[in-house]
Image: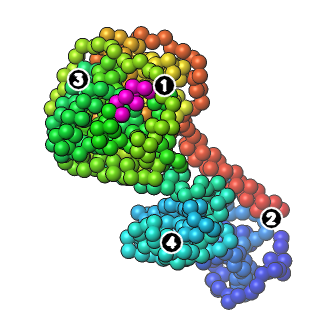
Amino acid sequence: MCSPKEVYSGLSTQEPIIKSQSQFHKDDSWNLVFICGSGTSACMHIAEVSTNTSSPTRAYRSLSVGTVTVITRRLSCAGSLLNSRVRLFILIIFIFCVMLGVASGATAATSSIPDHKTPTIVTVVPNPVVENDVGEFVVVDTDGVENLTLTDGESVITVPVVPGGTVALSAAPNQTRQRLEIPVRQAAVGLSNSGEELILQHQTGRVHEVTYSDAPEGERLNTTSMEWIPRGVELRSVTPTGPADVTAFVLPDTPAVPVTAIQSANKRILLAGYTYASPRVTDALLAAFDRGVRVRVLLEGSPVGGLSTAQRTQLNRLSNNGIAVQLLAGTPARFAYHHPKYAVIDDTAIVLSENWKPAGTGGHNSRGWGVHAHSRATAGELASVFAHDSTGYDVVPWSQARTDIVFNEVLPATGQYPTQFDAELISVDEIRVLTAPGNAGEAVRSRIDTAEKRIDVVSPRMNPSGPYFYALVDAAKRGIQVRLLLSDAWYDTDRNRAVVGRASELNASGLPIRAQIVTSGDQFGKIHAKGAIIDDRIALVGSLNWNEHAGTENREVVLELVGDEPATYYSRVFTADWQGYEGTDTVSRRGVNTESESEPEYVPLLLALGALAAVIIAGYALYSAILSDRR
């Protein structure tokens, strides 16, 4: 039996709380009472009441425990009114309440930033092309949130809220304003070219962090993709251009569509491409130029494999007759490759997967997809892209560039193929213009992520360890039917067989994903189309190869066609190509990536169960400690 002196030892006496003698147990037993509250300044009270005095009093001390109040009332040092199981249960409930209180307290602490507000560091330019890096800056989108600061671990900058929410911070605002159209504010910004960690903070804690290293001269860091964007590249958003009629076509079936469109031009032709060697297109461009049509041509200056003598011949024909021909051949280059294939013709636009040469638009080899959009808005958006790309510092006139080029002798394609699919004039509910770098890669993966029924993809190649294939596998895990058609070109064979092998393994495990390589045949030479049909409602047509490099480093153009009619047209082509070659490929296991594409769905459940077990163990440990103290 503990004496009253022992019980009161170490406790500070406070105002007594008197209760009637009848309320106390005559055997001086201990009693536990737990009360959970919601205030952030609640206290733990350890109280003793003695029945050996005529005026029962309570002594207590307080400990801060977040949002939980615990009252312990002791009437004895030995014995118990509650059995051990009940005590253990109460202790577990206590710990649960503590955790719940802390969680709610944390939520309350950060609730000053609304859930729909997401302040971010948008862009960092540490290494401008000026002496001493004068004009380096950071762009922050405050999203209207006040009390933000930016720090690099050495200094702290207050981020002002400006109209529109986006602000640039610079130690030399006058120089920075020459590059930006957003508000620029004076701030002690000093960025290291070798690397920095920038932290955007609110009074409630960290909001966004960006870490970079080795900043290239003149480039800016896109913090969404964490890619360095060369000087002179303006990233574009996905641009909806509304409903329109379009002429859907495929190659090699209907090579006349692009040429006929050029022949009908009255005002302008802006032709952009990767490679160009088509005599038929040259004839049509020269005829249009002679009619008074403004004609401009913009091409890649260093395509893989170099420029051919056939390209030299056709570009000389254009240039020598007065047509402006430009190559993206200067350094540093804004794009790894200028890889789009499109033409703005008056108030219409052609976008396709094929190059302007006999094997592509000439109809002498490749399976390609194309669309002629009879849409003023679509033509206007692509004209804007052309204007941006053709006025950069890395653009070189053909007359100048050709003097430094070593040309290769390449025989033109001469294959002949029947017309299986005619071009069709169809209606599209909405056209969306996708471009890379900037939005095309993310937009394509987003369409995959939101698919509900099926995805059919045609692509020259696919990386079995890349984000696009992983997105397709994740779609299959959701029950989406996935089919993938690939090329048998010799330079793609090994990687594509690895994709087919991986898809076969996944299909054998129960996932609805299949892939096959299409071999050359009577309908076309090789797969070169880059497109998809999603949920029988969306068709993607354009130049984007489904790899990370194309989506972030190349200039690419894709049209997203929303509607039943475009999806039906390209689906017929895909299905015919799939059925015509189904089962002809031999699966190879070489290069198969056996690593898991994503975290198993049961992992979060295991983590939750583990956390619950930890709570129970902690409660039992606390209970044992209390019993030990009593003994």
Q: Report which residue position mark 3 lands on.
A: 254
Circles 3 and 1, Cβ within 8 Å, touching? The answer is no
Residue 122 picture location, percent across and down: 49, 61
State which tag comes first along the sequence, 3 or 4: 4
Residue name at image x 76 percent, y 71 percent: 76
Mark seen at residue 630: 2
Q: Residues within 10 Å of mark 3 (few under 14, many from 20)?
A: many
When the figure is inspected, residue 50 is found, relative to residue 257, above or below; the finding is below
Q: Is residue 475 visible?
A: no
Between label 4 and label 2, give the one nearer the viewer.
Answer: 4
Q: Earlier in the sequence, mark 3 or mark 1?
A: 3
Which x, y percent locates residue 150? 57, 70
Under circle 4, the secondary element is helix
Between discs 4 and 1, the one toward the N terminus: 4
Residue 62 is drawn in which quadrant? Answer: bottom right
Q: In the rendered structure, find residue 408 and report the number of the disc placed on it.
A: 1
310 part of magenta stretch: yes
Left or right for 116, reference 622: left
**Magenta segment:** 308-316
Q: CA distance from mark 4 to mark 1?
A: 46 Å
Q: Say what amino acid the circle numbered 2 marks.
A: Arg
Residue at point 58% right, 56% down? 217
558 above or below 419?
below
Q: Identify the residue at image location x=22%, y=40%.
A: 289
Name the secondary structure under disc 2.
helix
- Name the amino acid, label 4: Gln
